[in-house]
Amino acid sequence: MSVGEELRTDQGKPQQSLGTAAARNLATTTKSVPQMQEISSRWLLRMLPWVDVQGGTYRVNRRLTYAVGDGRITFVKTGGQVEVIPAELGELPALRSYEDEEVLAELARRCRQRDFAPGEVIADFGNRNDGVHLLAHGRVEKIGTGPYGDDSVLGVLADGSYFGDQALVDPDAIWEYTVRADTASTVLILSRQDFEQIAERSQSLRDHLAQLRSIPEQRTNKYGEKAVDLAAGHSGEADIPHTFVDYEARPREYELSIAQTVLRVHSRVADLYNQPMNQTEQQLRLTVEALKERQEHELINNPEFGLLSNCEYDQRIQPHDGAPSPDDMDELLSRRRGTKLFLAHPRAIAAFGRELNKRGLVPETIDMGGNRIPTWRGVPLFPCGKIPISEARTTSIIAMRTGEDEQGVIGLRQSGLPDEIEPSLSVRFMGINEQAIIKYLVTAYYSAAVLVPDALGVLENVEIGRWR
């Protein structure tokens, strides 16, 4: 500034004191630690009971169960044409463990596609069952006659389900219920006639069916477990049955999964820019937060051990009207004893809240670590943004019983790792490279196990976009 010039304010008046921009050069600012939008409440990690695993593997021993193929069937879609993946036909009880790929491919080719409009009857009670129906897309209701003569909904089926499979093994099978399309539905039908024609030409299929019929019917309880023979209510010198409890020969084993990253910090940053905050500590803190977010995501969505993938088919239910109603939540609760918690996407909780508002219901809340959590029937409903929302704006609500003592869902980890900063989470120094960059290996080990099938249930295809 030349002699005679004066600093002027924005209003054009001469400046009479030191400006704030210049004053900042001599001031010490007050700073926050680095913030991170990805951090969520992570209620699943907080509420899941964690069990220490030795040797990296947890084995779930169960009573022997005589299971049948009752899983989901997968399809492929090309334009408007839908086809069943041949190997997926092995999910049908009549074809379980059958492995002739050529015959399965021929059976898949014989499945004919039919589209049904909402409200259209797919199968009628009392009529002859003409074949197995594979539900590729849509939602259908199984309707029977109630105790007072009115219609009663026996169940709701959705994508990947099947019905009428008894026709493959019993030529005289009839429909024991009516099946009606609740939404526009696409169904593939494998007729009894086509199945018999292929069986006549295939010796392997005939042998499989003969072996299936020769297996004696096993006495089981309602859960499919081998029955324990007992005597009760007898008098005198009655013969008391002999029994034993059989176990699964090949129990499932859960191996700990892993999440890792290598954190790099330049030595110049670590040496010169550590005041007032330690740069390495802040880098590690944010990295660990991201690792935990991924850990919770995997516990929900991993195809091997994730909760959504490991829920048994008979523990998955469909909402009767799309939106998550109190009736649907009651049905989900009724499938297991001692439900400890619900997990739902925040938008699913909002949709459930709208249904409660329509009925004039106000859910109770409980205090969890300073947070007010809504409950249903006394069970807390925790938000979890890791539960996916489909393109059709549907999601899922998870219900769990937790803990080893309760035969519930448990988290798995291994504590006591070298350089551990939290149980099953370690930070190891990896040295300094030629570019003076310090490296740290950040590792987390984790998994989840469902001890018995009814410990975990899912309300699927929950509609979150309905406002009326």
Image (cartoon, rainbow, N blue to C red):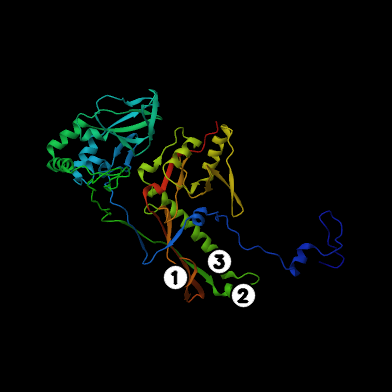
- The mark lying in front, picked from 3 and 1, is 1
Please report the residue visible at 39 percent of the width from the left and 28 percent of the height from the top.
Answer: 152
- State the quadrant of the C terminus: top right
- The mark lying in front, picked from 1 and 2, is 1
Residue 437 lies left or right of residue 450; in this view the side is: right
* Mark with earlier residue (1, 2): 2
Please report the residue visible at 21 percent of the width from the left and 35 percent of the height from the top.
Answer: 168
Amino acid found under the numbered disc labelled 1: Leu
Q: Nearer the viewer, residue 289 or 376?
A: 376
Residue 189's spot in the image, x, y percent? 27, 32
Q: Secondary structure at mark 2?
A: helix
Q: Can see residue 302? A: yes
CB atoms at circles 3 and 1 under 8 Å apart? no
Above or below — where is 175 with respect to 104? above
Above or below — where is 140 with respect to 53? above
Residue 74 lies left or right of residue 425; in this view the side is: left
Above or below — where is 4 with respect to 379? below
Q: Which mark is residue 272?
A: 2
Amino acid found under the numbered disc labelled 3: Gln
Which residue has dot 1 on it?
A: 417
Badge 1: few (under 14), some or many (20 or more) residues near its Cα, within 10 Å?
some
Badge 3: few (under 14), some or many (20 or more) residues near its Cα, within 10 Å?
some
Query: In 3D space, how far apart are the residues under numbered discs 3 and 2 (Cα atoms)?
Result: 15 Å
- State the quadrant of the N terminus: bottom right
Q: Nearer the viewer, residue 351 or 275?
A: 351
CB atoms at circles 3 and 2 under 8 Å apart? no
Q: Which mark is residue 283?
A: 3
Amino acid found under the numbered disc labelled 2: Leu
Q: Quadrant of residue 424?
A: bottom left
Q: Can see residue 392? A: no
